[in-house]
Amino acid sequence: MQPFHTLQGIAAPFQRINIDTDLIIPKQFLKTIQRTGLGKHLFEEVRYDDHGQENPSFILNQPDFRRASILIAGDNFGCGSSREHAPWALLDFGIRCIIAPSFADIFYNNCFKNGILPIVLPNAQVQSLMKDADTCRGQAFTIDLPRQVVMSASGATYPFEIDAGLKTCLLEGLDDIAMTLKNNDAITAFEARDQMRRPWVYGLGKVA
């Protein structure tokens, strides 16, 4: 997983609440187990028309926001089903950070497992960031994870809170498996001791 330290990128304001995972990546694209290739279907139902042509009014189709790496959205982002394809699609498009007043719990945790930083800020601050993103189109915002600060293109700064353990995972680029493997020596030592104590569990002997 790619570590996250400081991100400088364009922020796209998506003025909508209750953005669910089916809107993020529709169910017909859930057949794959690959984490790549889903970006072109991100927000498919609102990004394209019935003929597969781009909807020019959709924020990520507008020239100033086509390369956005930060998404600013409304309350309850990522609600609905628990599909991990949702952060996969966002990441494949290029989104590394989402700012919203609140997130669905499962989606929020799935973001950290895939190298995306979800930031919770009060609604008033989110609205200010959306306004700045629209006013300062194409100008970079800065997300400083070590300092836990969002800086808008206008220079306004907003501190944010984050769980220390989740912050470490992003800074070091560690998903759940990588976090477990950090303790590989301890795991190996335990298994060696346990094999001596309970060999039958490992197929090395039978219960007397």
Image (cartoon, grey):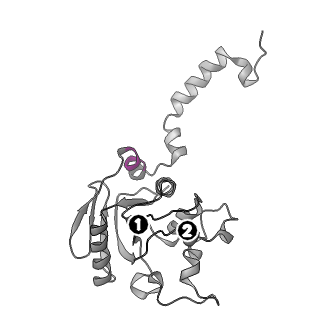
Quarter in which the C terminus is drawn: top right
Residues under labels 1 and 2: Cα distance? 20 Å
Is residue 86 shown left or right of residue 140?
right
Residue 206's place in the image compared with 155, above or below, is above
Is residue 161 shown left or right of residue 4?
left
Residue 53's place in the image compared with 205, above or below, is below
**Residue 25, horizontal then vertical, whole percent:** 58, 70
Q: Is residue 166 magenta?
A: yes
Q: Give the amino acid at mark 2.
A: Ala
Mark 2 residue element: helix
Magenta region, residue range? 165-169
Q: Give the amino acid at mark 1.
A: Asp
Front-most of residues 90 and 202:
90
Residue 145 image-quadrant placement: bottom left
Q: Report the number of numbered marks.
A: 2
Is residue 38 shown left or right of residue 12?
right
Instruction: Give the mark nearer the N terminus: 1 vs 2.
Output: 1
Residue 131 image-quadrant placement: bottom left
Specify the label residue 89 is tagged with: 2
**Residue 187, horizontal then vertical, whole percent:** 55, 29
| Residue drawn where x is 52% and y is 30% of the image | 185
Question: Do labels 1 and 2 touch, CB within 8 Å?
Answer: no
Which residue does the numbered mark 1 point to in the structure image? 75
